[in-house]
Amino acid sequence: MRIDIVTIFPEFFDVLDISLLGKARANGLIELGVHNLRDFTHDRHHTVDDTPAGGGAGMVMKPEPWGEALDAVLENGADDPIIIFPSPAGVPFDQKMARELAHEQQIVFGCGRYEGIDQRVFDHYADRGRVRLVSLGDYVLNGGEVAVMAMIEAVGRLIPGVVGNPESLVEESHEDGLLEYPSYTKPAVWREREVPPVLRSGDHGAIARWRHEQQIERTRRVRPDLLPPEL
Ligand SMILES: Nc1c(O)cccc1[N+](=O)[O-]
């Protein structure tokens, strides 16, 4: 998979050189391009924003730099890339979307700042391909970079070969629609708190049943909205 990021803070993504995603890049599983939006301006101050049409507070990101940047990124890219703009006005990001995005050939992330990006950028590229506004959550961030980082991690770890043991991807929160069960390890007793005996019983059937029951109980308690109607 190729991932391109357009941002005014390219250094924000230096952290993608380490850990799992750093290894995936070194192994050629993920190809990453980080592009500074200001490199696509032509004035002395590398201006990327201007006052909002119709007035109001803050500034809006100009369409011209975005057009030049996205054209450059798309020029030699995949046949059918998807362009994702993190936005509070977007569709909620979830594990289902992460799984779908893990099959893409190329994802282009556009990180907005200020009061957002001129709407004509979204409209222009939506007329030419797939554009999605995606929200990480109902809260206010200063820009899209944090959201892109989270999405890259959620998607990147699902790309075959990135995570060493694919089994570990199966029993995780949201993977089967339920929250994950509580985890324990050694010692058997810690500060007078014992590991549930069933987990030390060696009875794999009983352990599986206990874990599923724990998933249902935790989901019912913490996220009843995720509970399937039959439960
Ligand atoms: N919530 C928010 C924002 O306030 C700004 C950019 C992106 C997001 N988001 O993806 O959720």
Image (tube, rainbow, N blue to C red):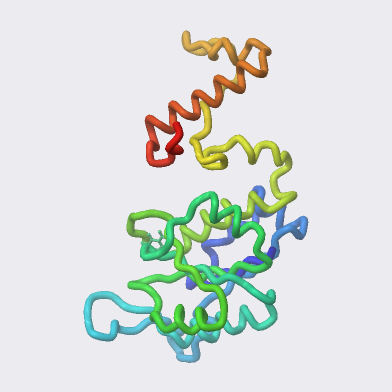
Residue at x-position 54% and y-position 56%:
97
Residue 102 falls left or right of residue 151: right
Q: Relative to the observer, which residue lies in front, 209 or 115?
A: 209
Q: Toward the viewer: 194 or 207?
A: 207
The foreground one among 204 and 76 is: 204
Q: Is residue 147 above or below residue 193?
A: below
Going 51% across and 11% down the picture, which residue do you hit?
A: 194
Task: Tell me the residue at 38%/34% (across/down).
Answer: 222
Where residue 116 appears, as percent x and y from the top left, is 37, 73
Q: Quadrant of residue 73?
A: bottom right
Residue lying at the far front in this picture: please name it: 230
- Ligand 1 location (quadrant): bottom left
Percent of width and height locating residue 175: 56, 42
Quadrant for the N terminus, please. Answer: bottom right
Q: Quadrant of residue 11?
A: bottom right
Q: Looking at the image, is 116 positioned above or below residue 22?
A: below
Q: Position of residue 217 (x, y in %)?
A: 44, 26
Q: Residue at x 34, y 55 (%)?
A: 138
* Quadrant of the rendering where the C terminus is positioned: top left
Q: Position of residue 177 (x, y in %)?
A: 51, 41
Say which of 91 and 187 sits in front: 91
Give the tally of numbered discs. 0
Q: Is residue 91 visible?
A: yes
